[in-house]
Image (tube, rainbow, N blue to C red):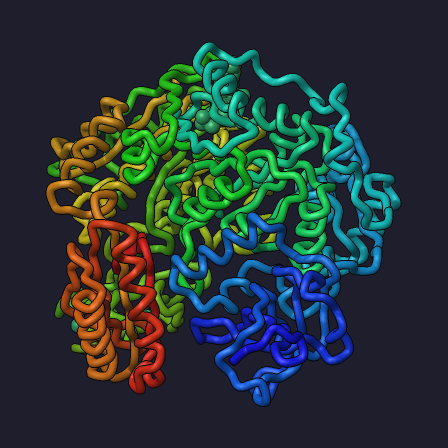
Amino acid sequence: MPSNSSENSPLILKLAVPSPLRRLFDYLPPVALAHHEPGFWKPGMRLQVPFGRRQAVAMLVETSTSSEVPKAQLKHATGLLDETPLFPGPLLQTLKWAAAYYQHPPGEAFSAALPAKLRQGSSTRPELESVWEACDTEAENSASLLGRAPRQRALLERLQQFGPLSRQECLAAGFSDAALKGLAARGLIRSRPRAPALPATQVDRATLERQPGHAPNPEQQAAINTISRSLDQFQCYLLDGITGSGKTEVYMQVIARVLEQGRQALVLVPEIGLTPQSVGLFRDRFQCNIVVLHSGLGDAERLAGWLQARDGTAAIVIGTRSAVFTPLAKPGLIVIDEEHDGSFKQQDGFRYSARDLAIFRAREENISIVLGSATPALESLQNAREGRYRHLTLPHRAGTADKAPISLLDIAKAATRDGFSDILLGQIEHHLGQGNQVLVFINRRGFAPSLVCQDCGYVFECRRCDAQLTVHKSPPGLRCHHCESRHGLPGECNFCGSTQLLTRGVGTEKSEQFLQERFPHIPVLRIDSDSTRRKNALSSRLVQVQSGAPCILVGTQMLAKGHHFPGVTLVAVLDADSGLFSADFRGQEHMLQLLFQVAGRAGRAQNPGQVTIQTRHVTHASLQSLVANDYHSIADLLLQERRETSMPPFCHLALFRAESTDQRLSLSLLEQTRSLCTQACQSLKLGDVEIHHPLPAPMERRAGKFRTQMLVKASSRGAMQTLLARVCPQVETLKSARKVRWSIDVDPVDLT
Ligand code: ADP
Ligand code: ZN
Ligand code: ZN
């Protein structure tokens, strides 16, 4: 029996230790700190602990006076790493909720939320290192000074857009000491200690806005007023505004009020939406410390930004998915731009949705959150309709630019050359002739999606995946886009030995080559993940586009988001059909969102624009909705379909996945999982839960592994949670779970 005496019932620290086990681990305080009162121990502190044969960095989640482990077997933690908790209470609550909701081992969930350095046990007080920052210089000045020094120019741009960097960070980003020296000698950059510039709480109201924003139109004003009225309480807004309607202006005006109150704003953007251009908008507008967090940062850079957010010296934090975990000293507002974007959902490991987590967090922090999109996720629309979110709409373009008319070009019977019909080529020529720019959208990178033998019809496939190999031109070869394997270009057919091999279909590289031959005097800029892999390759291309001279942009969805291309008057979609008949239940929704976004790139400045979409299915309802520029009526149709087939948002899904080189093993693990689910439903009396049979995944083999999945459907979130909380720890202990890689995905986005 536990007694009240502190000697008999020692304080137990319940810690999240990084490990695949879905539970907390009990430890005693470090011997040297055993004398502290229980109140000394605060959730969110890190401790060093012995774990198996290694030392691990763990986080304190709660304290207790009892443990299921006999006292004699409890180990002492080795050391305390933080004097104050790393996460403030509301964020800690959010993380605890997320680990439980997504059925992820708490140790790994907490770990995923930390910058790498803190995960490894670094102190939160790094020595002050010195950093290089850009001096305020007239753009023309620096341009003329740097005429023949592209590396220096690229480095300067990086410092201007993303803020100061240490020498180490510059070197890590691929720049040289020579580039730093050159810029310093020209007086374009200077060195200073890495110290927070201006605490958020001291944002100077009078000089906060470097330049005033637009005078809001009545719809923007209404949205700004409504959101501003609820800054001191939780409210989730869906800011549903067509592309070019000025959502950014709404965010900025509300953020200005938040900053004036001495509070901070967290802005989450999609991975490819976080461009120097979009960050530049905020830097141009606000004179305050803006921290940018994205996956390209070095560990030191990321930690520095994280600390500035936590101590309140960063007024605005802009980041991609994982920035949702950034602690804020004085949170005032969360904005999720392009809330429908797939990159907010983590697809492996800790499979959280940054959007849903941010909403939970806003509630815990008692602040408001704005979800913005021109094409809201069906889930969000439904939430707005049911009154859980407040629906704010911006149905018109802001400013003077008119909406670009969208037309479909029927290529069912037309001849095309490398994917381009004559009519489309004529339009491209016309727009270039007017001195304008053209954007060509193709959702496939590489030269061609397949290589085919002309004699026997053999198609080259990946040996490790159920997928065709993509032909690439630079560097030449065949590549698998699923396992990243690379092969040389074959000289002959694997099957019949014929040398008559032909590429089939069109990728960005082929279009680039075709357009360059067709328009030899016009620069053709390809923008996809291959062409922009090198640091600064994207920004240097964007600079060229901003110059306004005629050019053709060819690219994938990297082009679709966040960019403002004032010189583009024609947007062409080479082939809209690939997404129309997708097997995934979200396929159509995603394709539509993408096409609406791409179409929104046209005519965003004074020049009226035009959007042309080549298709073989002109009568398809999704494409017709594009022509009518009416996302909402097609969203209604899709929602109706979801209701009839009882799919999200009208039910809740979870997907168990298993993969192994031996298909029987993964199938058998999921069969066992299925019986555990059935038993749990009976013993917990859960009605309205459907447990599907395990099936091979749509792409059955990837990287040599056989992939199997099992879908669980529930009509209520509560039932799903009760079921998973019972079953997941059971699956963990199954013998076959050790031989197979398995995972659980709650609210999966991708069922392939
Ligand atoms: P969205 O994010 O909704 O696609 P943006 O915020 O990019 O739209 O705005 C589109 C363009 O309209 C931008 O160039 C922006 O500067 C301009 N703009 C926004 N609000 C106004 C306004 N009230 N008056 C004039 N121009 C505006
Ligand atoms: Zn052949
Ligand atoms: Zn492969």
In the rendered image, the quadrant that contains the C terminus is: bottom left
- Does residue 279 sit above or below 62 in this rendering? above
Q: Is residue 431 left or right of residue 411?
A: right
Answer with left or right where residue 153 lies relative to residue 17: right
Q: Is residue 54 visible?
A: yes
How far across and how far down the image is residue 401, in percent? Answer: 44, 15
Could one spot residue 571 in this view of the protein?
A: no
Q: Pick the residue in front: 576 or 684.
A: 684
Residue at 60% across, 53% down: 535
Residue at 33% x, 58% y is 746
Q: Please report the residue visible at 26 percent of the width from the left and 27 percent of the height from the top.
A: 632
- Between 722 and 103, the one lying in front of the other is 722
Of the pair 703 and 194, the residue shown nearer to us: 194
Residue at 49% across / 50% down in the picture? 321
Give the x, y percent position of residue 229: 53, 21
The x and y percentages for residue 644 are 11, 42
Q: Is residue 751 above or below residue 275?
A: below
